[in-house]
Amino acid sequence: MTLRLLFLGLALSWAGWVVAQRGGFSGGGFFGGGEIAVPEGTRTAREVDSRSTGTPQWTNAPGFEHDVFTFARLRYDKDPSRPGRRGGGGFTTDFPDSDLNLSFRLQQMTSLRVDPDGRLIRLNDPELHQYPFLFVSAPGALHLTDPETDALRNYLQNGGFVLMDDFWGEEEWENCEAVMARVLPGRRFVELPLDHPLYRGVFQIREKKQVANVRLGIASEQTGITWEREDGQEVHHRAILDDRGRIMVLTLHNTDTADGWEREGENDFYFHTFSEKIAFPLGINIVFYAMTH
Protein backbone atom coordinates (compact mmCIF):
# COMPACT_ATOMS: atom_id res chain seq x y z
CA MET A 1 0.00 0.00 0.00
CA THR A 2 1.39 3.43 -0.92
CA LEU A 3 1.88 6.22 1.61
CA ARG A 4 -0.82 8.17 -0.19
CA LEU A 5 -3.31 5.35 0.33
CA LEU A 6 -2.28 5.10 3.97
CA PHE A 7 -3.10 8.74 4.49
CA LEU A 8 -6.32 8.41 2.55
CA GLY A 9 -7.50 5.45 4.61
CA LEU A 10 -10.32 7.41 6.22
CA ALA A 11 -12.92 5.17 7.81
CA LEU A 12 -15.18 8.13 8.55
CA SER A 13 -16.08 11.18 6.54
CA TRP A 14 -14.86 14.47 8.00
CA ALA A 15 -18.41 15.32 9.04
CA GLY A 16 -18.89 11.90 10.60
CA TRP A 17 -15.68 12.33 12.57
CA VAL A 18 -16.92 15.65 13.92
CA VAL A 19 -20.15 14.13 15.21
CA ALA A 20 -18.54 11.02 16.63
CA GLN A 21 -15.42 12.44 18.23
CA ARG A 22 -15.77 16.07 19.24
CA GLY A 23 -16.12 16.66 22.94
CA GLY A 24 -14.43 13.40 23.87
CA PHE A 25 -11.50 14.99 25.70
CA SER A 26 -11.44 15.49 29.45
CA GLY A 27 -11.11 18.80 31.23
CA GLY A 28 -12.50 22.14 30.17
CA GLY A 29 -12.21 25.90 30.30
CA PHE A 30 -10.36 28.70 28.56
CA PHE A 31 -6.83 28.45 29.86
CA GLY A 32 -4.43 29.01 26.93
CA GLY A 33 -2.66 32.23 26.30
CA GLY A 34 0.92 32.98 25.41
CA GLU A 35 4.07 31.57 26.89
CA ILE A 36 4.39 29.23 29.85
CA ALA A 37 7.33 28.07 31.91
CA VAL A 38 8.59 24.68 30.73
CA PRO A 39 11.49 23.24 32.73
CA GLU A 40 14.72 22.62 30.85
CA GLY A 41 15.00 18.93 30.20
CA THR A 42 11.31 18.48 29.35
CA ARG A 43 11.30 16.04 26.45
CA THR A 44 7.65 15.65 25.47
CA ALA A 45 4.37 17.53 25.23
CA ARG A 46 2.80 14.87 27.44
CA GLU A 47 4.86 16.11 30.41
CA VAL A 48 3.08 19.50 30.37
CA ASP A 49 -0.47 20.02 31.63
CA SER A 50 -3.19 20.89 29.12
CA ARG A 51 -4.05 24.57 28.81
CA SER A 52 -7.36 23.96 27.07
CA THR A 53 -9.94 21.16 27.26
CA GLY A 54 -7.54 18.30 27.87
CA THR A 55 -5.66 16.14 25.42
CA PRO A 56 -6.45 12.64 24.09
CA GLN A 57 -4.65 9.48 25.15
CA TRP A 58 -3.73 6.60 22.86
CA THR A 59 -1.15 3.85 22.50
CA ASN A 60 0.51 2.00 19.65
CA ALA A 61 0.96 -1.73 19.30
CA PRO A 62 3.84 -3.19 21.33
CA GLY A 63 6.98 -3.38 19.26
CA PHE A 64 5.96 -0.48 17.03
CA GLU A 65 6.44 2.37 19.51
CA HIS A 66 9.24 3.87 17.40
CA ASP A 67 7.78 3.11 13.97
CA VAL A 68 5.63 6.23 14.11
CA PHE A 69 5.38 9.86 13.05
CA THR A 70 6.43 12.20 15.87
CA PHE A 71 5.34 15.83 16.13
CA ALA A 72 8.60 17.50 17.21
CA ARG A 73 8.61 21.11 18.45
CA LEU A 74 11.71 23.31 18.53
CA ARG A 75 12.75 24.75 21.87
CA TYR A 76 14.56 28.06 21.35
CA ASP A 77 15.58 31.11 23.36
CA LYS A 78 14.43 34.58 22.40
CA ASP A 79 16.99 37.31 21.74
CA PRO A 80 17.38 39.20 25.04
CA SER A 81 18.42 42.34 23.16
CA ARG A 82 15.06 42.83 21.43
CA PRO A 83 11.47 42.53 22.61
CA GLY A 84 10.58 40.21 19.73
CA ARG A 85 6.93 39.48 19.20
CA ARG A 86 4.66 42.21 20.50
CA GLY A 87 2.09 40.78 22.88
CA GLY A 88 4.21 37.76 23.81
CA GLY A 89 4.93 34.53 22.08
CA GLY A 90 7.74 32.05 21.95
CA PHE A 91 8.42 28.36 21.61
CA THR A 92 5.65 27.42 24.08
CA THR A 93 2.84 29.25 22.26
CA ASP A 94 -0.10 26.79 21.88
CA PHE A 95 1.92 24.11 23.68
CA PRO A 96 1.19 21.31 24.56
CA ASP A 97 -2.41 20.93 23.33
CA SER A 98 -1.79 21.81 19.68
CA ASP A 99 0.93 19.18 19.32
CA LEU A 100 -1.11 16.40 20.91
CA ASN A 101 -4.44 17.28 19.29
CA LEU A 102 -3.01 17.34 15.77
CA SER A 103 -1.12 14.13 16.50
CA PHE A 104 -4.36 12.47 17.61
CA ARG A 105 -6.28 13.65 14.56
CA LEU A 106 -3.53 12.23 12.33
CA GLN A 107 -3.82 8.91 14.16
CA GLN A 108 -7.61 9.02 13.98
CA MET A 109 -8.22 10.33 10.48
CA THR A 110 -5.49 8.46 8.58
CA SER A 111 -3.75 5.12 8.73
CA LEU A 112 -0.59 6.80 9.98
CA ARG A 113 0.62 5.67 13.41
CA VAL A 114 1.60 8.65 15.54
CA ASP A 115 3.67 9.07 18.69
CA PRO A 116 1.23 9.80 21.56
CA ASP A 117 3.69 12.00 23.45
CA GLY A 118 5.32 14.31 20.89
CA ARG A 119 8.83 15.66 21.32
CA LEU A 120 10.31 18.95 22.53
CA ILE A 121 13.85 19.35 21.24
CA ARG A 122 16.71 21.81 20.85
CA LEU A 123 18.81 22.11 17.74
CA ASN A 124 21.92 20.88 19.56
CA ASP A 125 20.22 17.65 20.62
CA PRO A 126 22.01 14.67 19.01
CA GLU A 127 18.59 13.02 18.45
CA LEU A 128 17.37 15.87 16.20
CA HIS A 129 17.89 13.92 12.98
CA GLN A 130 15.53 11.21 14.17
CA TYR A 131 12.67 13.67 13.62
CA PRO A 132 12.16 14.69 9.95
CA PHE A 133 9.36 17.12 10.90
CA LEU A 134 10.09 20.12 13.15
CA PHE A 135 7.53 22.71 14.26
CA VAL A 136 8.55 26.27 15.16
CA SER A 137 5.98 28.39 16.98
CA ALA A 138 6.03 32.21 16.89
CA PRO A 139 9.09 32.65 14.64
CA GLY A 140 8.66 36.39 14.95
CA ALA A 141 10.55 35.87 18.20
CA LEU A 142 12.97 33.23 16.90
CA HIS A 143 16.63 33.72 17.77
CA LEU A 144 19.41 31.26 16.98
CA THR A 145 23.03 31.22 18.09
CA ASP A 146 25.72 30.50 15.51
CA PRO A 147 25.94 26.80 16.49
CA GLU A 148 22.13 26.52 16.33
CA THR A 149 22.14 28.19 12.91
CA ASP A 150 24.67 25.65 11.66
CA ALA A 151 22.69 22.76 13.16
CA LEU A 152 19.45 23.87 11.49
CA ARG A 153 21.21 24.29 8.14
CA ASN A 154 22.58 20.75 8.41
CA TYR A 155 19.15 19.40 9.40
CA LEU A 156 17.44 21.01 6.40
CA GLN A 157 20.12 20.07 3.90
CA ASN A 158 19.86 16.46 5.02
CA GLY A 159 16.14 16.20 4.34
CA GLY A 160 14.52 17.82 7.37
CA PHE A 161 11.28 19.81 7.10
CA VAL A 162 10.41 22.85 9.22
CA LEU A 163 6.92 24.30 9.67
CA MET A 164 6.59 27.80 11.18
CA ASP A 165 3.27 29.19 12.40
CA ASP A 166 1.61 31.98 14.42
CA PHE A 167 3.38 35.22 13.63
CA TRP A 168 1.81 38.42 12.43
CA GLY A 169 2.73 41.61 10.61
CA GLU A 170 5.83 42.86 8.88
CA GLU A 171 8.07 43.23 11.94
CA GLU A 172 7.74 39.57 12.85
CA TRP A 173 8.11 38.49 9.23
CA GLU A 174 11.33 40.46 8.93
CA ASN A 175 12.78 38.67 11.96
CA CYS A 176 11.87 35.25 10.59
CA GLU A 177 13.28 36.11 7.16
CA ALA A 178 16.52 37.43 8.66
CA VAL A 179 17.06 34.31 10.79
CA MET A 180 16.48 32.01 7.82
CA ALA A 181 18.79 34.08 5.61
CA ARG A 182 21.58 33.13 8.03
CA VAL A 183 20.50 29.49 8.08
CA LEU A 184 20.23 29.14 4.28
CA PRO A 185 22.20 31.98 2.69
CA GLY A 186 21.33 32.54 -0.94
CA ARG A 187 17.88 30.94 -0.69
CA ARG A 188 14.80 33.13 -0.58
CA PHE A 189 11.20 32.56 0.45
CA VAL A 190 8.63 32.18 -2.32
CA GLU A 191 4.85 32.30 -2.04
CA LEU A 192 3.53 28.75 -2.38
CA PRO A 193 0.98 28.61 -5.24
CA LEU A 194 -2.35 26.91 -4.62
CA ASP A 195 -1.66 24.41 -7.40
CA HIS A 196 1.23 22.98 -5.36
CA PRO A 197 0.81 19.26 -4.50
CA LEU A 198 0.74 20.08 -0.79
CA TYR A 199 -2.79 21.47 -1.16
CA ARG A 200 -4.24 18.29 -2.60
CA GLY A 201 -2.32 15.59 -0.72
CA VAL A 202 -5.20 14.39 1.48
CA PHE A 203 -7.74 17.21 1.51
CA GLN A 204 -8.39 19.59 -1.38
CA ILE A 205 -7.47 23.10 -0.22
CA ARG A 206 -8.47 25.90 -2.57
CA GLU A 207 -7.83 29.00 -0.48
CA LYS A 208 -5.32 30.26 2.07
CA LYS A 209 -7.74 31.00 4.87
CA GLN A 210 -6.93 32.74 8.13
CA VAL A 211 -7.20 30.97 11.48
CA ALA A 212 -7.93 33.45 14.24
CA ASN A 213 -6.84 32.96 17.81
CA VAL A 214 -9.70 31.64 19.89
CA ARG A 215 -10.71 35.00 21.38
CA LEU A 216 -10.85 36.80 18.05
CA GLY A 217 -12.33 33.75 16.37
CA ILE A 218 -15.32 33.55 18.69
CA ALA A 219 -15.90 37.29 18.39
CA SER A 220 -15.56 37.13 14.60
CA GLU A 221 -19.05 35.63 14.35
CA GLN A 222 -20.22 39.22 15.00
CA THR A 223 -17.21 41.33 13.99
CA GLY A 224 -15.83 39.49 10.98
CA ILE A 225 -12.30 40.33 12.23
CA THR A 226 -9.87 37.41 12.32
CA TRP A 227 -6.50 39.18 12.15
CA GLU A 228 -4.37 40.24 15.10
CA ARG A 229 -2.75 43.28 13.46
CA GLU A 230 -3.72 45.73 10.77
CA ASP A 231 -0.63 44.77 8.76
CA GLY A 232 -1.48 41.09 9.20
CA GLN A 233 -4.76 40.76 7.33
CA GLU A 234 -3.45 38.76 4.35
CA VAL A 235 -2.43 35.14 4.85
CA HIS A 236 0.84 34.03 3.29
CA HIS A 237 2.19 30.52 2.90
CA ARG A 238 5.84 31.09 2.02
CA ALA A 239 8.42 28.38 1.44
CA ILE A 240 12.12 27.86 0.96
CA LEU A 241 12.80 25.17 -1.64
CA ASP A 242 15.85 23.01 -2.25
CA ASP A 243 17.43 22.54 -5.68
CA ARG A 244 14.89 19.82 -6.56
CA GLY A 245 11.89 21.92 -5.52
CA ARG A 246 11.28 20.12 -2.22
CA ILE A 247 9.93 22.35 0.54
CA MET A 248 12.54 22.68 3.26
CA VAL A 249 10.80 25.41 5.27
CA LEU A 250 7.12 26.35 5.19
CA THR A 251 5.82 29.45 6.98
CA LEU A 252 2.17 30.15 7.74
CA HIS A 253 2.21 33.93 8.21
CA ASN A 254 -0.66 36.09 9.47
CA THR A 255 -2.57 33.10 10.78
CA ASP A 256 -2.71 31.03 13.98
CA THR A 257 -3.14 27.50 12.67
CA ALA A 258 -1.97 25.91 15.90
CA ASP A 259 -4.71 27.67 17.88
CA GLY A 260 -7.15 25.80 15.67
CA TRP A 261 -5.52 22.58 16.86
CA GLU A 262 -5.13 23.65 20.47
CA ARG A 263 -8.57 25.17 21.09
CA GLU A 264 -10.78 22.77 19.14
CA GLY A 265 -12.91 21.83 22.14
CA GLU A 266 -13.68 25.25 23.58
CA ASN A 267 -16.41 26.67 21.36
CA ASP A 268 -18.70 25.23 18.67
CA PHE A 269 -18.45 28.18 16.31
CA TYR A 270 -14.68 28.29 16.62
CA PHE A 271 -14.35 24.55 16.03
CA HIS A 272 -16.56 24.39 12.94
CA THR A 273 -15.22 27.64 11.42
CA PHE A 274 -11.51 27.39 12.11
CA SER A 275 -10.46 23.97 13.46
CA GLU A 276 -12.55 21.69 11.27
CA LYS A 277 -12.50 23.66 8.03
CA ILE A 278 -9.00 25.17 8.03
CA ALA A 279 -6.51 24.14 10.70
CA PHE A 280 -6.81 20.36 10.71
CA PRO A 281 -7.07 19.81 6.93
CA LEU A 282 -4.05 22.05 6.35
CA GLY A 283 -2.05 20.45 9.17
CA ILE A 284 -2.75 16.93 7.90
CA ASN A 285 -1.81 17.92 4.34
CA ILE A 286 1.44 19.44 5.54
CA VAL A 287 2.44 16.33 7.47
CA PHE A 288 1.51 14.15 4.48
CA TYR A 289 3.73 16.28 2.24
CA ALA A 290 6.63 16.31 4.71
CA MET A 291 6.54 12.55 5.14
CA THR A 292 6.30 11.73 1.42
CA HIS A 293 8.89 14.15 0.01
Image (tube, rainbow, N blue to C red):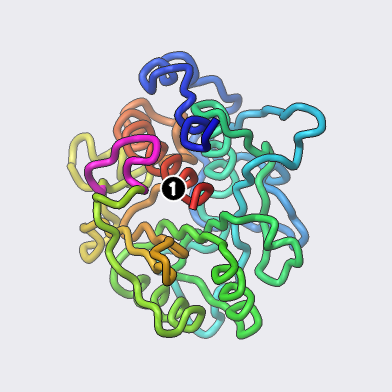
Q: Main secondary structure of the magenta part?
A: loop
Pick whichever, 217 or 200, lies toward us.
200
How far from the left and from the top, in percent, is residue 155? 60, 69
Q: Residue at x 67, y 28 (%)?
A: 57
The answer to whether residue 95 is magenta is no
Near mark 1 (Cα within 10 A), the count class, few <14, some 14-19 or many ≥20, is many
Q: Is the residue 224 above or below the residue 28 in the image?
A: below
Amino acid identity at mark 1? Ile
On the image, numbered disc 1 is attached to which residue?
Answer: 286
Pick whichever, 186 or 272, lies toward us.
186
Q: Is the residue 272 above or below the residue 230 in the image?
A: above
The answer to whether residue 199 is magenta is yes
Q: Residue at x 60, y 47 (%)?
A: 71
Pick whichever, 291 or 117, lies toward us.
291
Q: Residue at x 57, y 78 (%)?
A: 144
Q: Secondary structure at mark 1?
A: helix
From the image, which quarter does the N terminus lie in? top right
How far from the left and from the top, in percent, is residue 281? 38, 37
Magenta-colored span: 198-208
